[in-house]
Amino acid sequence: MNTDALLSVSGLTKHFPIRKGLLQRQVGAVQAVDDVTFEVARGETLSIVGESGCGKTTTGRMITRLIEPTAGSIIFDGRDITHVSVSEMRPLRRDIQMIFQDPYNSLNPRHTVGTIVGAPYRIQGIETEHGIKRAVQDTLELVGLNPEHYNRYPHEFSGGQRQRIGIARSLALKPKLIVADEPVSALDVSIQAQVINLLEDLQDELGLTYVVIAHDLSVVRHMSDRVAVMYLGNLVEIADRMSLYTTPRHPYTKALLSAVPIPDTSRRQNRERIRLEGDVPSPIDPPPGCRFNTRCWKATDICRTQVPVLTVFAPGHQAACHHPEEPTVATPATPAAAVTQAAETSAEGDA
Amino acid sequence: MTASAASAASAAADSPVGLGGLGAPAPDAFLSVRDLQVHFPTDDGVVKSVDGLSFDLARGRTLGIVGESGSGKSVTSMAIMGLHRPDTVRMNGSIDLGGTELVGAAPELVRSLRGKRMAMIFQDPLSAMHPFYTVGAQIIEAYQVHNDVPKKVARAHAIDMLGRVGIPQPAKRVDDYPHQFSGGMRQRAMIAMALSCDPDLLIADEPTTALDVTVQAQILDLIRDLQRDFNAAVIVITHDLGVVAELADDILVMYAGRSVEYSSADEIFRRPQHPYTWGLLGSMPRLDREPTDRLMPIKGTPPSLIQVPKGCPFNPRCNYRELVGEACTTQRPPFRSVGDFHHLACHLESADRQKVWATEIEPTL
């Protein structure tokens, strides 16, 4: 095991029982997450991507112990937290926090911003040097809100500002790990960019480690150091972002990437698109063998009978496939326009 | 009376601010919207959801309407479809659908056109379909409203339509309820329902927003193929510039209920001219570019539609206000033609725009 890992998950599994009849006998299970293994190093951002129903949110909720895993282990900061009780978990919640997708439902409408962001201090019984109010106001300032917003209610804020309140609440106790479940997908594109920049600044400033759960592959590439792809409860590929986006090994990853619409009309004609047929099968009765075999254009008999295991293709690059893609010569999408100092150029324009 | 309403009324002098050189409808236009205003009076003030919108659309072409939430995209489509309650809405301007004026038209007239000449696909197919009736029954009902045929014929038509949109085993699935369909299949069924009467105009309001990316790709292909078969005029409303780049021939960018930029899709992506369009493009992380360290968001938030900023509605968020001076905060920029089929509502001088685009924007996208 990597000693530098803040979080280490192995064989993580969650089966939700399906009960029927008068006696509520278990007749089956939704196999939401099955045998997922990965590590997150300190200070890095790991994103989990996949389509709805792939188990990415369930994985995130197991890491934060909002739901109980069926099997497997979760080691956080050297400590096994797989089956710790609610009361044992409480002190650990200082270190593991969550940002939710919907900034409308995740804030209590009857509480002021001060109460919402101050709640972690009160629950954890933390004394702050200049009182809770001051600490809350400092946090609000950190996420780009006005400290004077302390006494306002969530409905007075826009979606982007509400998401900042949610971020402030998760930052209040200076956690080590933040699990962000679709942190920007409910926001408009111009606001989305503001929040992404904020999350990146906070990571640099506070040395945070992120697990980002998302479905937007463009956002994920921008934010992540490493990316894990899930399909129907399985982890199918995990790699650093450059390898994953330039040389995907799993056919599903390749199909996902080719399906992303590109905002450039000149690419409409000559783009190679892999058209996946059909829908994701039900996780109640997943296909035998490789779970992707029903939609895969490369599937053969072995795929229908044998479950593929994660195989190392390059340092840090693993995929679970019987017929992996050959790495094509990496061709950058455009001549590298390494323009990063946007602030400088706009300053020039003002002068 | 507001300034825009006043100028709309005095069409004699200059062309109204929303027209942008779009005087008479283009000869091949099937749908022609001129200076459309959709206002909702409320206790807090008048919500100007759409305030000066003009465009033309020909058969067989696709117009993409792009904007953020609250920019008036959906209100526009509902106005065209006549779906606003007449007692709550104030509409002005003109919507000409194949020679029929829809603004102020009798509800019976609009109802006879809805479904037959114009149809709509909604974002969320689960709430747009009735959970109590089978998918087939809903398509049959829509077909029989406009076609005097026995139920048997309508059912055969429904099965045929479901097959055309790619539902496997349509003869069997026609008797399924919406909840038995997956999200992608429901959206296909919605499309089948919308196309069942062979409409001339199809409005797709965020047709793929609720779908996963691989299913989205399927539905985008389907809409493109069906448009070719049916030769309909299509309006795609979305916040996703990737989706419009896939589908649209022309693009209209909306901000705070107004059209700010309107041109061909190629032109909008190759040489956008409005600071808001630049901001939208800079805000998006893009898979077809090298990864950048930072995104360049638009500062601030979209305005309230009750109190739209004076002058240009985008001015509080615009980085180039200093290049113009006072006009941005006092005068509403006219929607004018700045090139061969390129319309723009911005006070920036042409030379400044070109310079900013070439030196600051283009290299960073």
Image (spheres, coloured by chain):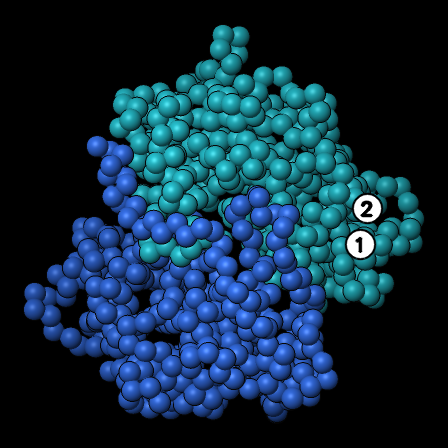
Count the marks: how many?
Answer: 2
Q: Pick the quarter of the image with the C terminus of chain B.
A: top left
Q: Are marks 2 and 1 on the same chain?
A: yes
Question: Nearest the camera: B247 or B95?
Answer: B247
- Chain coloured cyan: B
Q: Residue at x 78, y 42 (%)?
A: B230
Q: Residue furthest front?
A: A329
Would you call the spot at circle 1 few (<14 residues within 10 Å), some (14-19), or many (20 or more)? some
- Which percent across, then down, holds residue B1? 42, 18
Q: Earlier in the sequence, mark 2 or mark 1?
A: 2
Q: Is residue A18 above or below residue B230?
A: below
SS class of the residue under badge 1? helix
Subunit bearing disc 2: B
What residue sits 55% from the left and 62% below the top?
Answer: A257
Amino acid on which the number 1 mark rests in the picture: Arg
Q: Is residue A283 visible?
A: no
Label disc, if present, on residue A168 of the rendered structure: none
Q: Residue at x 35, y 89 (%)?
A: A1
> Where is residue A113 shown, x and y percent of the image?
25, 58
Instruction: Give the letter of the chain under mark 1.
Output: B
Residue at the spot of label 1: B164
Of residue B344 and residue B129, the one placed in the foreground of this image is B344
CA separation in Å, label 2 and label 1:
16 Å
What shade does chain A have?
Answer: blue
Q: Which residue is mark 2?
A: B143
Instruction: Report the front residue among B103 and A4.
Output: A4
Is label 2 or label 1 in front? 1
Q: Percent x, y for residue A35?
A: 51, 86
